[in-house]
Image: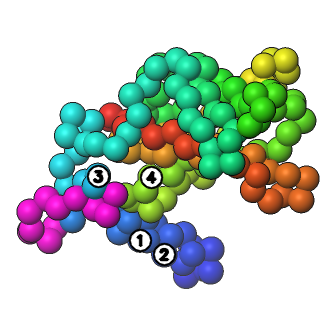
Amino acid sequence: MTRLLRFALVGLAAFTVACGDDDGGGEDEPTTTGIPGPGQLEGCDVLEGFDEYVAGLEKTGADGYTFRLVAATPAPPQQGENTWVVEISGPDATPLAADASFSIVPWMPDHGHGTNIIAGVTPVNDAAGQFEITPVDLWMPGVWTVDVTIENEAGARVDSGQFAFCIEG
């Protein structure tokens, strides 16, 4: 068996274990985040700890930056590829510069994985600090967090905001 094929099979096995059903036979118990994990109760009607989508949903980072989800297509966010417009301003309400550097990380906290697709960022309204982010790949049902992290010229974290949505299948 070639090394590449072995690597692919090991990766597939690890992914299957991380996202597979729990056949432990026990009752549904919440995970450490309070959100049922793989093989447990599923569906947004029984889950807690996520945001309800509304245009203009706003988060404030620990260092005072404001992250506003201006729009999402589709709205609310759904399984598959999404496009978001995010507005970011500093602690003094100054819009983030169009050449600012930041990262977008979609993550499933109860499954312990993200996505392989890296979202692109395009400034859409320099005066308001608005950026289009696409694709925000929420490829499977469950609770997804999406961290928007501003970075300085050296790549160090400046501040971040987190949106969390339950995606139905």
Element on which disc 4 rests: loop
**Left or right, 76 with reference to 27:** right
Tell me which segment is drawn in magenta: 23-33
Label 3 element class: loop
Q: Is residue 169 above or below residue 118?
A: above
Please report the residue visible at 65 percent of the width from the left and 24 percent of the height from the top: 85
Task: Give the residue type that dot 3 points to.
Answer: Ile
Marks 2 and 4, how far apart at CA: 21 Å
58 over 161 or under it: above or below: above
- Residue indicated by mark 1: 13
Mark in the foreground, 1 or 3: 3
Mark sitting earlier along the chain (3/2):
2
Can residue 92 be seen in the rendering of this structure? Answer: yes
Q: Which mark is residue 108?
A: 4
Q: Is residue 24 magenta?
A: yes
Name the mark nearer the viewer: 1 or 4: 4
Give the CA separation, mark 3 to mark 4.
11 Å
Residue placed at 19% from the left, 40% from the top?
A: 46
Q: CA distance from mark 2 to mark 1?
A: 5 Å
| 35 sits to left or right of 105 | left
* Residue 10, numbered circle: 2
Label 1, residues with CA under 10 Å away: few <14, some 14-19, many ≥20: few
